[in-house]
Each structure stands twice: as C-alpha cells, then as structure tokens.
Amino acid sequence: MIKAVLFDLDGVVVDSEPLYQVAERRLFARYGITIPDEDWALFRGVSEDEFCQLARDRYKLPLPLEQLRAEGRKEVLEVFSGGLKFMEGFETLYGQLRPDYQLGLVTSTPETIFNMMDGRLQLRNLFPLVLIGEMTAHNKPHPEPYLTMMATMRINPEETVVIEDSIYGLRSAWQSGAWTIALTGSIPVEAMPRRHLTVSHLSQLDAESIFSLPGRIAVAAG
C-alpha cells in the first residue's frame, strides 16, 4: 500500500528549470561560452557542487570552483527574484494527496537558494518534511536522499512513490526502491533512465492513480 509521495523540487513542484537556464546562460556568457542544446540535460537535477565541477571541466573554465559557485548562485538568486511559480497542476495534485498521504520534498537545491524559494512560495508550509542538498553525505543520483526521507517517515520503499524529472533524480528514486514516476519536460523521454510510469503533465496524476500504481505495474508485467 502506498503511504507516502515524495516530490523533487525543480521542474516538479516549482517551474524553475527555465529560470535556471537563464541564469546559467548569463553565467557562461561572461566567459564567452554558449551551451549546446544537448548539454542542458546534463545539468538538470545535479547538486550545486556537481554543476560547478561539471561546467568547469566540460568548458575548461579558468576559475576556482568557489568563484564559479558564488557567481552562479548570484545569477540564480537575481533571476529567481523576478518571479517563481508552481508547476502547472501541482497545487491540484497536492490538494488531492494531502489528506491521505505523507508528503515530502527531496531536492539537491542548496540551502541559500531553497530559503529564497521558500520565502516566496511557502514551501515548508506545504511539506512538513524537507530534505535539501546539504543534509546527506551523498546527493542524487545516489539513493541516499530518498532513503533518508523514507527512514525519517518510517516507511519502506515499496510504500513510497517518487515524482522526478531529471536523469539524476530518476536514478536516485529508482535505486532507492521506490515506485518512480517520471515527469517529462526537463529531459527527452528517450534519455530518461528506468522508471515505472511516465507522464507529460501533473494533471495526469491523482490520488487514485498513485494509490493503484503497484497494481497497474504488476498487471502490465504479468
């Protein structure tokens, strides 16, 4: 029986991925770098440190990681200040799930950026339990973030559904043993790792479809 639904933040709860792209373009433009379209999926769902390391290595950026982190965070905070909003369909889905399920938020977003998002959207009022990037030894794609949240909730993976949209996030959810739902948009469907269900919009989900997910997978596999 499903007892909990765990949400990723960026691209699932908050429509922040386009804003990240604006900030990242501005950051890289300082150094004369244009990001190829096929590279954007590499940055979705990674921690701040992993983003900086990947970007510096991939584009041969001649600056220390600390400087890149500081410049990138400044760009993100400036862009985010222009307006954050929930993903279309999230608030309806949340309202359907809240009475019957434990809900948690699991994100690689660093504390500084999360706190700004929380101040604008009151995320901690929606989610009694939040796990952010600095709270575990390993970030996604390691399963530790989701396993840690499950342990906090005192639930098992087979009682848990995770909604994710990134390669790293989907790998983390799948390896945790949870029922994994992939939301398209951040990465192409053909690039997605293993998952139990794929949806193109949160309106395709409701309390009944989530509750019945294990049975539907069993029938499909049978």
Image (spheres, rainbow, N blue to C red):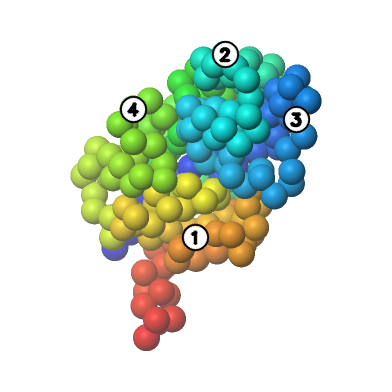
Q: Is residue 118 visible?
A: no
Specify whether 26 is left or right of 133: right
Label 3 to label 1: alpha-carbon separation: 29 Å
Nearer the camera: disc 4 or disc 2? 2
| Of pointers 3 and 1, the one earlier in the residue sequence | 3
Nearer the camera: disc 3 or disc 4? 3
Residue 67 numbered tag: 2
Residue at image coords 46%, 63%: 195
Q: Which residue is mark 1?
A: 193
Of the residues shown, which amino acid type is indicated by label 1?
Answer: Pro
Q: Which residue is mark 4?
A: 135
Specify whether 150 is left or right of 20: left
| Of pointers 2 and 3, the one earlier in the residue sequence | 3
Residue at image coords 48%, 47%: 168
Q: Are marks 3 and 4 in contact (CB under 8 Å)?
A: no
Q: Which residue is mark 3?
A: 33
Residue at image coords 46%, 21%: 111
Of the residues shown, which amino acid type is indicated by label 3?
Answer: Ile
Label 4 to label 2: alpha-carbon separation: 23 Å
Of the residues shown, which amino acid type is indicated by label 2?
Answer: Gln
Label 3: few (<14), some (14–19) or many (≥20) C-alpha neighbours in 10 Å? some
